[in-house]
Image (cartoon, helix red, strand yellow):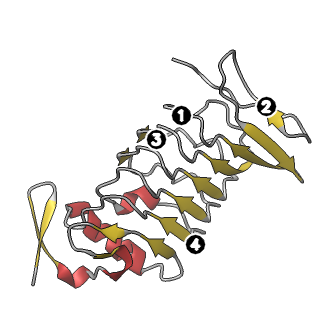
Amino acid sequence: MILLEVQCIIPKVFVIFNDSNFTCSCKVVKGSVDVDCAYLDLVEVPSSIPNNTVLLNLLQNQLMHIVNGMFSDISSLQVFDLSFNKINSIQQRLFEDQQRLEILNLGRNMITGIKRNWFVGLHKLDSLDFGENPIECKRCGFKQFVEWSKTRPHIVLRGWCVDEKSAISDVKVSTFGTCTGNYYFVLKH
């Protein structure tokens, strides 16, 4: 296992890391830090991401799981790109410490269900991208997500329900029936 550590050297663009070929870049502009770890085939998020990071780019890696606490020290994060990975699960309340987060891109992963609890605390969120994920909108937790998203009409929501063949933003709460078991709602027709 290769552990990557991010260190920013003010005010230059910096290069990171151990004896491997992995390199993240870090740019410091007016005290804000942009960390770019895109296209590195990472299977884990680098440790020690600076807590004043405003933009974190983890685009096009091999990340599968994102766990709670992973980003809790990064309270300045405004733009977070996790697209083009293999993420299939997100722990509830993962982003609750990201109160400044405005743009979250989870597009082109393997996410099949969405739960409202994933986005607790994201009061400044303006853009949420689930595009190109195999989202199954009949999952029980999805109803709560739809209810949550309807209370935030300012959010640009992108994604597609593979089981309903409609945009996530077009799903209506009234189409949900009763949850049967732990996973699926029976939709009323």
Q: Nearer the viewer, mark 4 or mark 2?
A: 2
Whole-number angstrom distance, CA of label 1 to CA of label 4: 28 Å
Residue at the location (56% across, 19% down)? 2
Query: Within the image, what quadrant is residue 6 found in?
Result: top right
Mark closest to the chain's N terminus, 1 or 2 = 2
Whole-number angstrom distance, CA of label 4 to CA of label 2: 31 Å
Crowding near pointer 2: few (<14 within 10 Å), some, many (20+)?
Answer: some
Left or right of 160, for residue 14: right
Residue at the location (54% across, 33% down)? 42
Which residue matches tag 4? 126
Label 4 amino acid?
Asp
Q: Nearer the viewer, mark 3 or mark 2?
A: 2
Which residue matches tag 3? 68
Label 2 amino acid?
Val
Crowding near pointer 1: few (<14 within 10 Å), some, many (20+)?
Answer: some
Quarter that holds the C terminus: bottom left
Q: Secondary structure at mark 3?
A: loop
Q: Nearer the viewer, mark 4 or mark 3?
A: 4
Crowding near pointer 4: few (<14 within 10 Å), some, many (20+)?
Answer: some
Q: Is residue 7 above or below residue 133?
A: above
Q: Is residue 58 above or below residue 47?
A: below
Which residue matches tag 1? 41
Whole-number angstrom distance, CA of label 1 to CA of label 3: 21 Å
Question: Answer yes or no: do the residues labelled 4 and 3 have beta carbons within 8 Å?
Answer: no
Left or right of 150, for residue 155: right
Mark closest to the chain's N terminus, 1 or 4 = 1
- Residue 16 lies, in percent from the top left, at 75, 28
Q: Secondary structure at mark 2?
A: strand
